[in-house]
Amino acid sequence: MLFDMEIDMSDESTTVPEKYRRDGAREYHNDHIVVYWEPRLCIHSRHCVRGLPEVFNSQRRPWIEIDAAMADEIAATVAQCPSGALSFARLDGGLEEVVPDETTVTPRPNGPLAVRGRLRIVAADGTLIREATRVTLCRCGHSENKPFCDGSHRCVGFQAP
């Protein structure tokens, strides 16, 4: 059974982004699939680049070559993005992302909390920040994009037991 996970952002110093703030966001599409990339959420885990390098190549511009693989392969790779910076929609009736049966929170080694499930992140005032199936949340306290990780843990040498 699926359930909603609500995260209370009661820290008043946190700047709350809009539900789907599209700062620098890009879309890459063909007749079968559209891939959305939101760089402000990207933690550079490189699951995409390692998983399907013919499509995802950070040394190339544009860095996503949507016609370099089949839509099913692209969708499977995008679904491995822990931060949700990459997402997709099928235009050909193909399978959409499967929402996990249960919500999980997994601490990444010396990094953020990787959260998967049916997620609703809300501010202390009840404002919806984001609905998603994948996010990475800051646990070092230094992110400039709270509650989301922005990779600051690498710069400050965050260590977790």
Image (cartoon, rainbow, N blue to C red):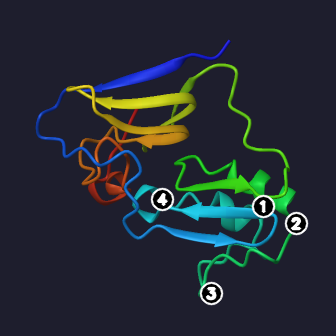
Residue type at numbered disc 3: Arg
Q: Nearer the viewer, residue 83 or 15?
A: 15
**Which numbered mark, 4 or 2, is in the foreground of this view?**
2
Element assignment for label 2: loop
Residue shown at 80% from the left, 77% from the top: 67
Q: Which mark identifies residue 60?
A: 3
User: On the image, numbered disc 4 is attached to which residue?
Assistant: 42
Mark 3 Cα shell of 10 Å, populated few (<14), some (14-19), many (≥20): few
Label located before the other in sequence (1 or 4): 4
Question: Is 67 placed left or right of 148 in the picture?
Answer: right
Q: Which mark identifies residue 74?
A: 1
Q: Nearer the viewer, residue 51 or 96?
A: 96
Distance, label 3 to label 4, CA atoms, is 17 Å
Element assignment for label 3: loop
Looking at the image, residue 42 lies above or below residue 11: below
Element assignment for label 1: helix
Q: Quadrant of residue 47?
A: bottom right
Looking at the image, residue 48 lies above or below residue 114: below
User: On the image, numbered disc 2 is attached to which residue?
Assistant: 70
Element assignment for label 4: loop
Residue type at numbered disc 1: Ile
Distance, label 2 to label 3, CA atoms, is 19 Å
Residue type at numbered disc 4: Cys
